[in-house]
């Protein structure tokens, strides 16, 4: 991610997501210490003063024994959420929202616009905060702590509202929301295929996850995916879109896609064959081990760092000196 991060405003949001992940980790551990955990344990680390609670608050406690098993379970749980936030932050820092919107099918254009706007909100918010804090430091004003955050919050909110109005005006000027004249039969067929395909995907996934329905799970899943894709293809006919300089899909794009699919498939296979390797036990408390071939499978995800082109350097205009 660090070698292929573009020189754009959204690429500076990764640090904020890392800080958010650390905050989630600390909050989850603090909850486990103060509010207890349902995980039983025998290795007591500290005994905090316990606050008595009424009968209607059974299952909740304040203070008491803090065991190593409870803290380890909370740490594993928080690490999963922290890793998810870090991955989302990496996607925000690498993905170009406009290119992402162009690659979506026509039927998902409205939904894609909403997702792209949501993805660009966090990076632009971080960029606005950094810009305002730098301006306050140049003026010799306080920019840290709660006071600095409150004084920066109002200009950031004002900038977000102005950006929203400008975005709405730009979307209206470019004809967003205008649809083609599609016959009613095509609209009904599109809705039936899309809804039926999604139901088939849900039923097929449920069939694959249950042992009793494993025979029909895969066929129903494949049929649902095919019906959903057909519905998306028909739904794209009602959206009037033009493409200007479409992104080429070359061999490097196939390698990046294949690396992500390979990592997901290998980790899914590892989780199905040896669940304890990726989910270390807590009761009894055991030291986690490093599974070799799942760890090697994760390294396949580093392939885009070598096959993708380096981002273009930003050219800053220098003022003439006298």
Image (cartoon, rainbow, N blue to C red):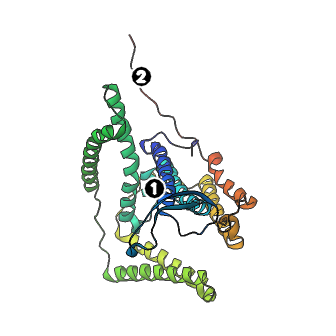
Q: Is residue 151 above or below residue 304?
A: above
Mark 1 or mark 2: which comes first in sequence? 1
Residue 63 picture location, percent across and down: 48, 60
Q: Residue furthest right?
A: 292
Q: Residue at x 50, y 80 (%)?
A: 202
**Alpha-carbon distance for marks 1 and 2?**
33 Å
Label annotation for residue 134: none
Image point 45% across, 69% down: which residue?
A: 60
Q: Which mark is residue 318?
A: 2
Would you say 69 lies left or right of 194 here? Answer: right
Q: Position of residue 287 (x, y in %)?
A: 71, 59
227 lies above or below 127: below
Q: From what the image shows, is residue 58 above or below residue 1?
A: below
Crowd band around label 2 with a 10 angstrom C-alpha radius: few (<14), some (14–19), many (20+): few
Mark 1, other Cα within 10 Å: few <14 / some 14–19 / many ≥20: few
Q: Residue furthest top?
A: 322
Front-most of residues 129 and 309: 129
Q: Quadrant of the C terminus?
A: top left
Left or right: residue 109 compared with residue 207:
left
Location of residue 9 with respect to 51 vertically, above or below = above
Q: Which residue is mark 1?
A: 100
Residue at 31% across, 28% down: 141
Image position, residue 53 (x, y; %): 40, 68
Q: Is residue 153 left or right of residue 245?
A: left
- Residue 314 in the image, given as x and y percentages of width and height: 47, 34
Q: Is residue 247 visible?
A: no
- Name the secondary structure under disc 1: helix
- Res 253 → quadrant: bottom right
Does any portion of residue 171 appear in the rendered image?
Answer: yes
């Amino acid at each position: 991610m660090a070698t292929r991060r573009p020189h754009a405003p959204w690429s500076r949001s990764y640090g904020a997501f890392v800080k958010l992940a650390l905050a989630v980790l600390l909050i989850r551990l603090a909850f486990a210490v103060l509010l207890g955990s349902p995980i039983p344990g025998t290795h007591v680390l500290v005994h905090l003063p316990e606050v008595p609670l009424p009968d209607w608050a059974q299952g909740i406690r304040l203070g008491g024994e803090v065991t190593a098993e409870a803290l380890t379970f909370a740490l594993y749980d928080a690490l999963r959420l922290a890793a998810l936030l870090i991955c989302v932050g990496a996607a925000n820092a690498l993905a170009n929202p406009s290119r992402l919107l162009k690659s979506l099918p026509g039927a998902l254009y409205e939904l894609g616009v909403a997702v792209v706007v949501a993805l660009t909100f966090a990076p632009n918010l971080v960029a606005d905060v950094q810009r305002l804090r730098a301006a306050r430091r140049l003026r010799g004003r306080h920019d840290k702590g709660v006071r600095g955050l409150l004084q920066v919050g109002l200009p950031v909110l004002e900038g977000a509202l102005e950006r929203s109005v400008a975005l709405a005006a730009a979307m209206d000027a470019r004809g967003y929301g205008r649809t083609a004249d599609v016959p009613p039969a095509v609209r009904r067929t599109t809705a039936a295929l899309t809804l039926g395909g999604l139901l088939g995907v849900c039923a097929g996934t449920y069939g694959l996850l249950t042992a009793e329905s494993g025979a029909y799970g895969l066929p129903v899943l494949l049929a649902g995916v095919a019906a959903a894709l057909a519905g998306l293809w028909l739904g794209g006919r009602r959206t009037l879109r033009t493409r200007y300089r479409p992104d080429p899909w070359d061999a490097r794009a196939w390698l990046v896609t294949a690396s992500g699919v390979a990592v997901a498939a290998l980790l899914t296979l590892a989780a199905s064959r040896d669940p304890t390797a990726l989910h270390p036990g807590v009761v009894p408390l055991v030291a986690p081990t490093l599974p070799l071939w799942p760890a090697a499978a994760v390294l396949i995800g580093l392939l885009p760092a070598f096959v993708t082109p380096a981002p273009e350097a930003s050219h800053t205009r220098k003022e003439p000196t006298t």
